[in-house]
Image (cartoon, rainbow, N blue to C red):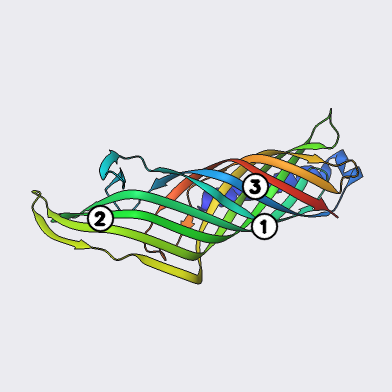
Amino acid sequence: MTKWLLSFACQLFALISFGANDSIQKSINRRISIGFEFAPASYLKWSFPEYQKVLFYDPSSGKEKGDYSTKIIPLPMCGLHISYSYNKILKIETAISYSKEEAGGVILIDTSDYYFTRRGINSYIIRFIQIPLMVNFRIPNKSKKRNYTNCKIGLNFDFIYYEKNSYGGETKFSLNGTIISQSHLDGKERHNKYSFNKITPFIFVGREHFSKNENFSFSYGSMFTFKSIYQQHNTSEYFKNYKITPIIIGIACHF
């Protein structure tokens, strides 16, 4: 984590230095932007650090499908976006967004020295208030003066406020396969209990198109979110994932 943060700080310093020294400083355009962004869908690839083995199954058939620890979820993010233009090529940005993650149809197998436990989870849903901090390095399109390519790097700070876990059964086996115990697990759910959960780094690449007077813009792009570099175990399950969001759409007003 320390190495990643040092690398991020160096890149940020280099970007600011470049923007401050470049001749483009002659036409500094400081302005505040406020807009709305949303993503239609995201692809999640899950990992389960506490468990030796993970199997996914189809709840409708009950058949195991192997280790397919992936899920596509609709509307994973939407919210208010705010940015400040340091100069023509550098923006500092943040947001406050609704965000969610889901895992479904998973069997967790945890092995100890004396037995192994097989536990089913029918579905797992988490919802967050997400606050990202990012640096946007903007590349102007020479042929189209009001168009930019946006290259962003940043960190998401996720505050969990909703969690729902629909469990199946739990079976404890001896190492020779004998069943020691079986039980049905009650589901867990919490509402409006806010707590800080994790920090995840991300990169974003996209395009932004401005209106003629440059007080309005439309943007789109793709984002890759890495696994958390810091995560508290304050949830009913301890899952991690990386996330691919193929399209994020935004509109913004500039002041």
Point out residue 72 in the picture as x, y percentages from the top left corner.
Answer: 47, 43
Can residue 178 be seen here? The reply is yes
- Residue at x-position 77% and y-position 46%: 90
- Circle nearer the N terminus (3, 1): 3
Q: Nearer the viewer, residue 99 or 138?
A: 99
Q: Amino acid at mark 1?
A: Ala
Give the residue at mark 1: 95
Give the residue at mark 2: 119
Q: Residues within 10 Å of mark 3 (few under 14, many from 20)?
A: few
Q: Residues within 10 Å of mark 2 (few under 14, many from 20)?
A: many
Dot 1 falls on a residue whose secondary structure is strand
Give the residue at mark 3: 10
Dot 3 falls on a residue whose secondary structure is helix
Q: Amino acid at mark 3?
A: Cys
Looking at the image, residue 226 sits to the left or right of residue 57; the answer is right
In which quadrant of the rendered image does the C terminus lie?
A: bottom right
Point out residue 115 in the picture as x, y percentages from the top left corner.
Answer: 14, 55
Q: Could you give the CA–CA distance between mark 3 and mark 1, rounded to whole angstroms? A: 23 Å
Q: Is residue 134 positioned above or below 182 on the image?
A: above
